[in-house]
Image (spheres, rainbow, N blue to C red):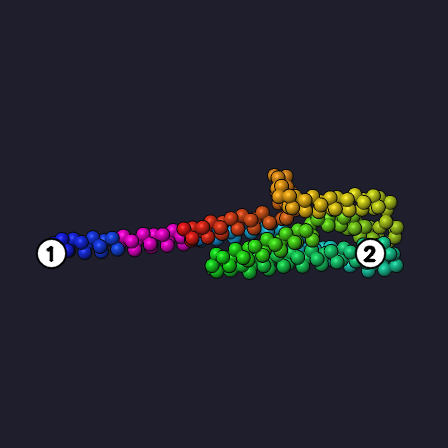
Amino acid sequence: MQNMIDIDDLRWAWQRLGEQMERSESIQLQLLREARLAGTRRSLRGLYIGQSLQLLLGVGLVVLGVACWTRNVDVAGLLAAGIIVHAFGLLTAVMAGLVLVLAGTIDYSLPVLRIQKRMALLLRLQTLNSSACGLPWWVMWIVVVVAFAGLDKADPAAGTPAWVTASLAIGVAGLLGTWAWSAWSRRSGRRSRLAASIDRSVADGADGIRRGQRLLDEIARFERD
């Protein structure tokens, strides 16, 4: 009888130990999840700041473009410059707004897999944003200078100085060269440190998204194990 009692006590103690270990693992997982999710939110701060500034830039370009083309409807070059800046400003503001909305609507209470999918979508959108609104600055800075010159109606020729042609040629060459190099590096799989650093500088905020993805990957691995 004593042996039966001892065995029962041992089973009960073993069961209690198992339950305590399960609770401990559950608590550890919850703590890790909260810490990593908090880190994921922090990793997007740079994205929020960068896109807020991009949104303001877009609004400023719209104002500049409208001011230029409405003052120069009779000057073809300045009219075109104003319309281009206006359109590019709209694109810049809209893309920044889309990134901010998507980043702000991520629900961190969802399962990790669904958060990872939203982060992947955010990264794709931000990559598109950087390509559409970042790379064109090889040329757009020249058009912006022309638009500023177009605000001075006293000198309608100010918007078309001789250096514009040379500057545009250099800008177009730089833009095409950047696109070609980026396509080659991705196709060949040669991602050097220089390539990675250029990607980070061009795709403002994308590096923060990738850090957030790595933190989410840690949670997923811990949950699987």
At x 83%, y 53%, the residue is 150
Is residue 48 something that shows in the picture? no
- The segment highlighted magenta reads 16-30
Residue 45: within the magenta? no
Q: Residue furthest front?
A: 188
Closer-to-camera residue (65/30): 30
Mark 1 and mark 2: Cα distance apart in space: 100 Å
Give the residue at mark 2.
80
| Coordinates of residue 3 in the picture (x, y in percent) | 13, 53
Q: Secondary structure at mark 2?
A: helix
Q: Secondary structure at mark 1?
A: loop
At x 58%, y 59%, the residue is 102
| Coordinates of residue 8 in the picture (x, y in percent) | 18, 56
At x 88%, y 50%, the residue is 157
Q: Main secondary structure of the magenta part?
A: helix
Residue 27: within the magenta? yes
Of badges 1 and 2, the one in the foreground is 1
Give the residue at mark 1.
1
Tags 1 and 2 touching, CB below 8 Å: no
Is residue 170 something that shows in the picture? yes
